[in-house]
Amino acid sequence: MYTAASQVKSLIRRILHLHMSNDTALLHLLGQPGRGGRATMSFSTSHFYLTYQLKCSNAFLKAGTPNRELLYSARIGAAYFMKCRSGSEHEYIVLSVYGKGEKDVEPRLLGWLRCERTVADRDNTPLNHAKALSSTEWSSGHPGIPAQDCITVYNDGYDSLGDVVTKDPTIFCIDFLQERTFEGAPFLRDLAVAADLLTNRSPLYRLRRKQCYWFAGLLFRTIVGPQANDLRMLAQGLTPVPGNDEGHTKSNFVLSRDQPKGTFCTIFNIVTSGEIETEHKELTPGYTQRVQELQTQLAEDRAQGNMSALLEEQVEEERKKTATAEARVEALEEQLRALQAQHTPNA
């Protein structure tokens, strides 16, 4: 659990809009079972991606790191599409994260992620939204409202979705661990890349087109895959098209039919599935390339770490051999001195 000093430090960093500590949140998220208590911390999407990349590299390159594959091999257990009941009917995604440590027989819960697009309190004014609404994405007039895309990390002290989200309904969800196998679920690194890519693709909050509905819808589509469209059809009471994913079953979906995704007051369709699908197709080449680049880099770090570990083992083995040989030489020299003492004439 956090100490009082660390809590004060975190509060100050939040007030000043500074990045939070790299290690603390992911340390609590990824892998310190039995520590007790609950902890949570927010990252910008870019900071989360860089932190994930750094932690994976350090785990591979630093000899003796326990569970060095845990973060790299962590996967999304379930994806929940959430919608607030009131206000702007904010939409966001909650994901459970699972992993297998060196001593784990089955995957265990590592923590939860809440992914969403908002704006800073200082920018969330009617005047700013009106100016942004009247300008285009790259107009030379009003610069737009900077999007505040964030990923909030909850540690494994949060046992269930109800602990993370207390009142907002789930529009629908998919449980990858039931729907597929652990090895078939999306990687945590897929989420890290996708969220960062969306922020880079549209860093400004646009009330008409690039708001929370767009961010949540496109991120959900990227992580879940074609089944995201099946889920929308299910939510509308239609029959999904079979064959999009092997093992597709209705029983693994949780739906709230009275709160359609991408709409305001269940009437105004702000973001359509067609728009999400179009942007997803445009996004896919860059997303695929970045995932491959990250995999390649981390694979190189792992290979370098394995080579370093092997060389360290060989060095240690040679040291042991040298120590054994030196001890043997010393014993033989002692025997020789004793033998020579026996044959030395008395003075």
Image (spheres, rainbow, N blue to C red):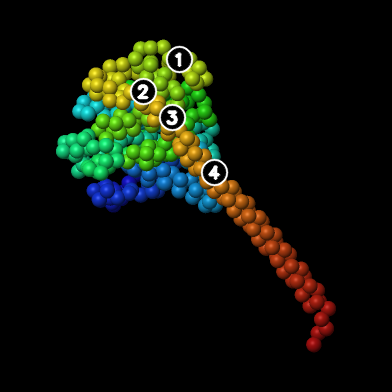
The type of residue carrying mark 1 is Val
In front: label 4 or label 3: 3
The answer to whether one can see residue 8 in this image is: no
Q: What is the C-alpha distance between the residues marked 1 and 3?
A: 19 Å
Q: What is the C-alpha distance between the residues marked 2 and 3?
A: 12 Å
Compare residues 202 and 310 and report the one nearer the observer: 202
Residue 218 lies left or right of residue 315; in this view the side is left
**Element carrying mark 3:** helix
Give the quadrant of the C terminus: bottom right
Q: Are marks 2 and 1 in contact (CB under 8 Å)?
A: no
Q: Label 2 belongs to which residue?
A: 273
Whether residue 258 is situated above or below residue 144 in the rendered picture: above
Mark drawn on residue 241: 1
Looking at the image, is mark 4 or mark 3 earlier in the sequence?
A: 3
The type of residue carrying mark 4 is Thr
Looking at the image, is mark 2 or mark 4 earlier in the sequence?
A: 2
Q: Are marks 2 and 4 in contact (CB under 8 Å)?
A: no
Q: Label 3 belongs to which residue?
A: 281
Residue 293 percent across, percent down from the top left: 51, 43
The type of residue carrying mark 2 is Ser
Looking at the image, is mark 1 or mark 3 earlier in the sequence?
A: 1
Q: What is the C-alpha distance between the residues marked 2 and 1?
A: 15 Å
Q: What is the C-alpha distance between the residues marked 4 and 3?
A: 23 Å
Residue 132 percent across, percent down from the top left: 22, 37
Q: Are marks 1 and 4 in contact (CB under 8 Å)?
A: no
Q: What is the C-alpha distance between the residues marked 1 and 4?
A: 35 Å
Residue 190 percent across, percent down from the top left: 45, 36
Residue 112 percent across, percent down from the top left: 38, 34
| The quadrant where residue 29 appears | top left
Q: Label 2: few (<14), some or many (≥20) within 10 Å?
A: some
